Amino acid sequence: MNARAQTARSEDLDQPLGEFLLIAMNPVARYTGELVRFSLASAGVGLLLDGNNGDPGTSVPGAVRFVFVRPHTDTIVSSTPRVSKKGLER
């Protein structure tokens, strides 16, 4: 499961009942190869981290609200790699 999605779920404990928030993220693949994206939900049975269709061609209604999670500092690239005719340089 995506660590950022788990962190977002554990940090938003005051989510109103009935609210669903789609996590703005690249989809992840299940062991079957199916792409999944996550949403945070408060559905009456408690707080949920729900996996749903992550197909890049899928569109969502304009009323859907998104959650953006900042990356951990250890995943931020400190410099931009240079591109030459040979490819990427470090």
Image (cartoon, rainbow, N blue to C red):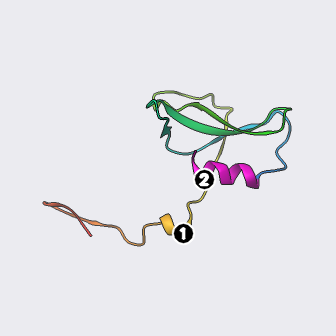
Q: Secondary structure at mark 2?
A: helix
Q: At which x and y percent is residue 17?
A: 86, 36
SS majority, magenta = helix
Above-or-below relation of 49 to 5: above
For the question of whether residue 68 can be seen, the reply is no
For the question of whether residue 11 can be seen, the reply is yes
Q: Quadrant of residue 41?
A: top right
Q: Give the magenta-colored segment's residue range.
A: 1-11
- Tell me the CA gap for discs 1 and 2: 13 Å
Query: In which quadrant of the rendered image does the N terminus lie?
Result: top right
- Mark 1 highlights which residue? 73
Instruction: Please name the amino acid that badge 2 sits on.
Output: Arg
Instruction: Please name the amino acid that badge 1 sits on.
Output: Thr
Q: Quadrant of residue 88?
A: bottom left
> Is residue 4 rendered magenta in the image?
yes
Q: Quadrant of residue 61?
A: top right
Q: Report the residue at 85% width, 41% height from top.
A: 16
